[in-house]
Image (cartoon, rainbow, N blue to C red):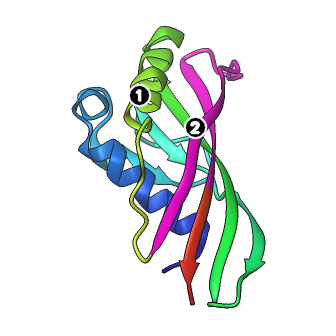
Amino acid sequence: MIEPTLALQTAIRAALVANPAVSALVPADHIRAGGSRPDKTPCVIMSDGNTALQGQDYTALRAAWVYLDLHIWTLDAGEDAVKEIAFAVTTALDKTLTIEGGYCDHFKVTASRFPRDPDPAYGHGVLSVEALIRWIV
């Protein structure tokens, strides 16, 4: 398995790209990891995230809590468009995620926020997620 944060980002992207409601609102190549205001909109940009390692058991099973934010951006579409995308993303992620080389024992969207961007042309939403990831070394 790759690093837990990268594994979770990969699983989230796969779930969003495969969901018809999300793909109707956001092109697949606009769903990515990153850390800045987007160059293409509408988009979903996953933050780098944080990993809290939980140790290992006697079988070399590792566990970690992973926390990250999904930033949703629109341009000249208004705040309602951001909220529509956020709802579609939240609904698409309301399922068990498949982690390559590991297991996702817990996953949920824990919060949503819609901060105003200094440039009123941009709509911005943030979904916070948490996951418990396990893997064997």
Give the amino acid at mark 2.
His
Q: Nearer the viewer, residue 99 or 85?
A: 99
Q: Main secondary structure of the magenta part?
A: strand
* Numbered marks: total: 2
Q: Secondary structure at mark 1?
A: helix
* Residue appearing at x 59%, y 25% in the figure: 124
Is 10 colored magenta in this rendering? no
Vertical placement of 85 versus 59: above or below? above
Crowdedness near tag 2: few (<14), some (14–19) or many (≥20) residues, C-alpha within 10 Å = many
What is the x, y in percent for residue 94?
44, 35
Vertical placement of 70 versus 125: above or below? below
Crowdedness near tag 1: few (<14), some (14–19) or many (≥20) residues, C-alpha within 10 Å = some
Q: Cα distance, mark 1 to mark 2? A: 16 Å
In the rendered image, which quarter is residue 26 located in?
A: top left
Left-right relation of 58 to 45: right
* Residue appearing at x 49%, y 20% in the figure: 82
Q: Mark 1 — residue?
A: 91
Q: Secondary structure at mark 2?
A: strand
What is the x, y in percent for residue 7?
50, 67
Q: Which residues are magenta?
A: 102-131
Q: Mark 2 — residue?
A: 71
